Amino acid sequence: MNFGKISEISVNNTSSWENIYLTFDVDWASDEVMKYTIDILEKYNAKATFFITHETRILDRLRANNNFELGIHPNFNSLLNGSTEKGTDYNHVIENILKIVPEAVSVRSHSMTQNSNILDAFKKFGLTHDCNHFISNTSEIKLKPWLLWNGLIRCPYFWEDDIYAMEKNKQDIDYTFLQQGLKIFDFHPIHVFLNMSKISQYESTRIFHNDYGNLKKYRNKEYGTENILKFILDRSINFN
Ligand SMILES: [Zn+2]
């Protein structure tokens, strides 16, 4: 199995459905936290898609590696909470993040926020691939991409690190590889860095998320998100 970037997913080219797609929701992670994930991916020479939340110097490093694609991770939560902090309406939120990542063609919203108006706006702003639909691998549904009414390519994803940590009836991660269909994984650099296995670990370290010196003391030593990412990287390479 090879790794792919989200923009390489095609509705007509079924071989594009067979790749492993690693995606990362940046969620305002610090550059040090980002660097930790990038170092792992570059060691494996793996392709990946980063959904970007903010302007920062490490975007230059991501752009310098052709294995990486930069998409956008617009945050509509402030609008839903009645705040105009991130923009005054959904068009404004999308415009603001596209100023930081003008090359983006792929998108996943923070908290997966979507509706038909937002999806039409993604299309209007030139995006081609939408990753907002989560259909858990535990559903055992064989996934594939499809075209939305407006021509956007919908790329459903089947696994997310923080959801996996909360799932009651967790499947062994190896199980995801046995499933048929499109395999898009959603990681967060902060969870990779913390090697998170319990959401409580993440929540309790929030005050240190931008304090690298302290944050690194709180890395989980048991099996966690970083181990899962490395398992996927090792397993995919061994399949080739
Ligand atoms: Zn997010």
Image (spheres, grey):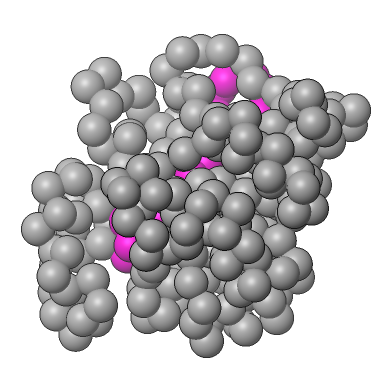
Q: Residue at x 62, y 29 (%)?
A: 116
Q: Position of 181 compared to 51: left or right?
A: right
Q: Position of 16 compared to 218: left or right?
A: right
Establish if 90 lies above or below 146: below
Quadrant containing the C terminus in the rendered view? top right
Quadrant containing the N terminus in the rendered view? top right
Looking at the picture, how far across and down is residue 22, in whole percent? 57, 49
Q: Residue at x 55, y 31 (%)?
A: 115
Q: Residue at x 41, y 80 (%)?
A: 31
Establish if 151 lies above or below 195: above
Q: Position of 190 compared to 154: left or right?
A: left
Establish if 231 lies above or below 11: below
Residue span colored magenta: 177-193
Looking at the picture, how far across and down is residue 11, in whole percent? 83, 29
Dividing the picture into quarters, in which one does residue 203 lie?
bottom left
Looking at the picture, how far across and down is residue 56, in whole percent? 50, 82
